[in-house]
Amino acid sequence: MDDGRRQRRWTLALVVGLAVLSCAAGVWVVLTPGEPATDETWELIQEEGVLRIAMDASYPPFEFIDEEGSLVGYDVDLAHELGRRFGVDVEFVIISFDGLYDALRVKRVDLILSALPFDLRLTEDVAYSHSYFNAGQVLVVREEEADISSVENLQGRRVGVEWGSMGDVEARELLRRMEFELYQYPAPQEALAVLAEGEIDAAITDAVSAYQFSRQHGGIKITGSPVTDEPYVMATLPSSFALQVRVNEAILDLSANGFLDQLRLVWF
Amino acid sequence: MRIRRKEVVARVLRALVLVAVLIMAGAIPKPIIIVGPPHTVETVNPKMGVHTRLTDEVEEWKIQRSLQLVREMGAPWIVEYFPWGYIEPAKGQFDWQHADMVVDHAVNQGLTVMARLDFVPEWARPKDTTFRYLDEDHYEDYGDFVYAFVERFQGRVDYFVIWNEPNLSFEWGYRPVDPEAYTELLKVAYRRAKEANPDCYVLNGGLAPTIAREGNEWGLSDLLFLQRMYDAGAKEYFDILSIHAYGFVYPPDDPPAENKISFSRVALAYEVMVRNGDGDKKVMITEGGWNDHPRWTKAVRPYQRILYTIQAYEMARDWEWCQAFVVWSFRTPVPEKNFRDYYTLVTTGFILKPIYLELQNYARGATDWLLEPAM
């Protein structure tokens, strides 16, 4: 064997050896248990026995101050249920909507629960929970209506919306591919009242307005799938991963066991 | 030999054509936005204004369309937000592209721009603070930014709003509000702005209407905050008072009171100015108006919002000391999907709301807005 060939073999062996060592080191790093990650927020909640929740108490039926001066609403009941499940008290920190996210950022609160719409632009700043309520636009018809079960059945019909609302936007989108008469009203309640009286065949409004009108006046129903999705979510700091997991588990469970449906029946 | 050379030339040409076609096919054609000839605003009320909120609007045609609609509505004033952190992402490195675009289109539409300057970049604040947090060590950095901004927009922008709602804790970086510290910031900004353009107008950060008393965790009454600003020597460091005037559930002519938030509360702020020998200055309402969400507890009905807004524009016209009333807000780049969408005059998708059309009629001289609709 000449010197050149021997040298090439040594080089090859060295390269292979280094590659094997690198792989082994990688496996060791991956498999070796490191320091367990800690969620300081969750630890503090457990230590102090208090879950601090930011809320803008001006948005019925989700959170508002009732005539007796008490904080009440769908979100308030949901917050108390979270506290019960976590075995801690709930402290509501009442903040205007504009200040909710900053209160979380500076750790003044642990969680935002305030009819909070999912915001794609903030997903690097906060961690959003699963949705617990869909406040999007829905198709509403009279209670006895059997022929309209989706927006596809609106051809040739009379449809009411709140002028300039997301329902109006959706209706105008639909008009690009089908024909119906569009009637615009100053507020969703007007559109729903006119629907109940039979002057129009369907309305596209937000889900809460539809639920509320149905409960207060009757004569209408939501039909088909939601026209748009506007999920309400809770927000935590991205570092509050243990809290996030528990919040998400709770939402899934409360949805499955009917608690959220019950809340809706209580408040809308 | 001659034939071969021709073949080579032909092949090269074919290849060049192919490359050119591929480049053109791969290039995304830019929409052609033409600024066009300059316009002027026609209105019966030169004090009408709107907050345009184009900060996060990335598409130029939407910026142009928004400002065109403002002009067509008849509002000569706009307030626009120019975040320091967007424009100066690293100390001394400026990106003026978006700000230039907004200002050029606004000026082309004949609008007068008031530039709100805040939003602290990460390099100018400690970790884990909000973008509203600025400590005194970085006041000069903010001053440098103000100088750069005022200098760049000389001849295009003459009005500069220094900070936003410093009487609210969250607008002060979630620290206790501090009128004296804010006044120091205002002094730095005023000095640097005047160095860049002695003829510019410096406005204080618009004070938020709140009835919070001394020691409140979340803020301090606008009236008390303003008095403490005067006590700290602010008088010589703003040319026009900027204040916010939200009506919530009260009509605009509801009598003002220190313990109530209503549109006419702004008159109490002017009284503070007069008491401090500053009554010759003007007041600009740089945010305000009503909301018509169907359920929000601080909202009114849509027809009330229209009526109140027009009445408020009328009141501003009658108030000799008031230079402009800027309604919050014209449009947002994306829907907020909650009650805040009900402050706007135009939807994200440029659907004109009834209030836009009524304000436009008002600006064109219509007087039948005094009649309340049946609804």
Image (cartoon, coloured by chain):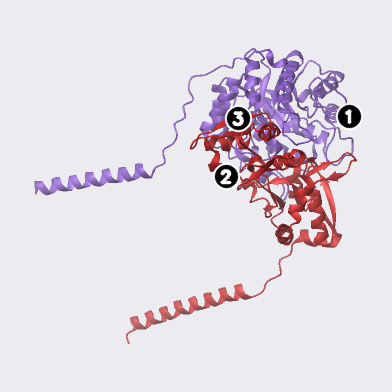
Chain colours: A red, B purple
Describe the element under mark 2 as helix, strand or loop: loop
**Residue hosting label 2:** A150
Q: What's the amino acid at mark 1? A: Asn
Q: Residue furthest bottom?
A: A1
Q: Chain of mark 3?
A: A
Q: Quadrant of residue B141?
A: top right
Q: Quadrant of the C terminus of chain A?
A: top right
Q: Quadrant of the N terminus of chain A?
A: bottom left
Horizontally, residue A26 falls left or right of residue B49, namely left
- Where is residue B276? Give x, y as percent: 86, 20
**Residue hosting label 1:** B259
Residue B374 to residue B176: above or below? above
Describe the element under mark 1 as helix, strand or loop: loop
Query: Mark 3 packing: few (<14 Cα in 10 Å), some, or many (20+)?
Result: some
Res. B79 mark: none
Could you tell me if the residues under marks 1 and 2 are in contact, i.e. CB atoms within 8 Å? Answer: no
Q: What's the amino acid at mark 3? A: Tyr
**Residue hosting label 3:** A183
Which residue occupies 81% across, 56% down?
A81
User: Who comes first in sequence, dot 2 or dot 3?
Assistant: 2
Q: Nearer the viewer, mark 1 or mark 3?
A: 3
Query: Mark 1 packing: few (<14 Cα in 10 Å), some, or many (20+)?
Result: few
Which residue occupies 61% across, 35% down?
A201
